[in-house]
Image (cartoon, grey):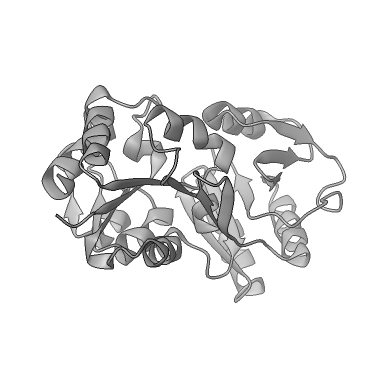
Amino acid sequence: MESKILFLDIDDTLLTKDKAVTDENADAIARAIKAGHRIVIASGRPLLGILPLAERLGIAGEGGYIIAMNGAEIYDCGTGRYLLRETLAPEDVEALFREAERHGLYVHTYDGSTVLAKADGPELRWYVGQIHVPYRIVPELPAGLHSAPAKVLIASLSDHEALEICRKDAAPRLLGRVSLFFSSKKLLECVKDGVSKGNAVTKLCGLLGIPIRNSFAAGDSENDIPMLRAAGLGCAMANATDACKDAAGYVTERDCNHSGVAEIIEKFIL
C-alpha cells in the first residue's frame, strides 16, 4: 500500500467550534499513522500555537511536519529545524502597519512565535487566548523589530467590512510583494507574495517523495483554498465557506463539531 499524506487545517476543521479535538477525530488520526500514513497540520497559527496539539495527536516526533503561518514556514519536528521560512520585507511590514492604522484597525506581527503588538486591547487578548502563545507590547512597532517576520495580522472582532476595505485599499499598493487573505471573518492574514498553504503542500510532498495524487487536504476558509487546489483531493468541511466548498473535490457530510476529519480519513486515507 502506498503511503498517503493528509494536510489538516486547525480551526473549524480539526478542532470543534469550542477548540476541542473529538475522540473520533483523534482515534482516526492514530489509526492512519499506525497504518503508515502521514498527518500534517497546516495552519495560519505560529509554530508554538500548533506544537501542543501536534504533540497531543502523536504527530510532533520523528517524521512529523508542521506547516505554520499559512505556508510561510515548514517545520521538521524530528530535527527541530525549519525546511522553509519565508519572511516579509521590512518596508512591507511598515506599509501593512500604516494601512491598518489608517483604517483604525488592530495589527500585530511576530518574533518567531511571540506576538508583538503596539498596545494591549481586545483583539490581542482574544487572539492569544485562542491559540495560547506568548505576547509582548512593543509601542515603537514596526521600527522595533529585530528580525523579519513571517506574517502580519490585521484583525477586527466585529467589523469584517472594515477589514475588506483595508484589503481592497492595500492590495494594489502591495501587488507582487504581499498576499492578503482571510482565515476567518475576524482575521486578515498578510504574508510574502507567493506564500500559501498550497505551495507548502507541493513543497513538502516533493521533499518527502510523496506523489501529489496521494495527498489530501481539509479546510474551511479562504486561506485553505490554495491547499485544497494543490492536493490530490481537497476536502471542504460541511461548515466551510461557499468559496472553499467550490474549490474542493469533496465536501464532508459532517461538520467540524461532528468529526468531519474522521469522515475524510475513513473514506480516503484508510
- Residue plotted at (38% across, 45% down): 9
- Residue plotted at (54% across, 35% down): 49
> Is 33 placed left or right of 75 in the picture?
left
- For residue 51, above or below residue 38: above
- Residue plotted at (52% across, 42% down): 186
Residue nearer the viewer, 222 or 21: 21
Measured as percent of width and height from the top left, residue 236 is found at 26, 50
Residue 56 visible in image = yes
> Is 266 placed left or right of 92 in the picture?
left
Measured as percent of width and height from the top left, residue 40 is found at 38, 47
Image-quadrant location for residue 119: top right
- Residue plotted at (28% across, 35% down): 256
Residue nearer the viewer, 223 or 55: 55
Check the picture and name the quadrant holding the N terminus. Answer: bottom left
Measured as percent of width and height from the top left, residue 239 is found at 27, 41
Residue nearer the viewer, 177 or 133: 133
- For residue 53, above or below residue 67: above
Residue 157 visible in image = no
> Is 177 placed left or right of 19 in the picture?
right
Residue nearer the viewer, 97 or 158: 97
Check the picture and name the quadrant holding the C terminus. Answer: top left
Which residue appears farthest toward the bottom when viewing the image? Answer: 176
Image-quadrant location for residue 226: bottom left
Measured as percent of width and height from the top left, residue 232 is found at 24, 64
Give the mark count.
0
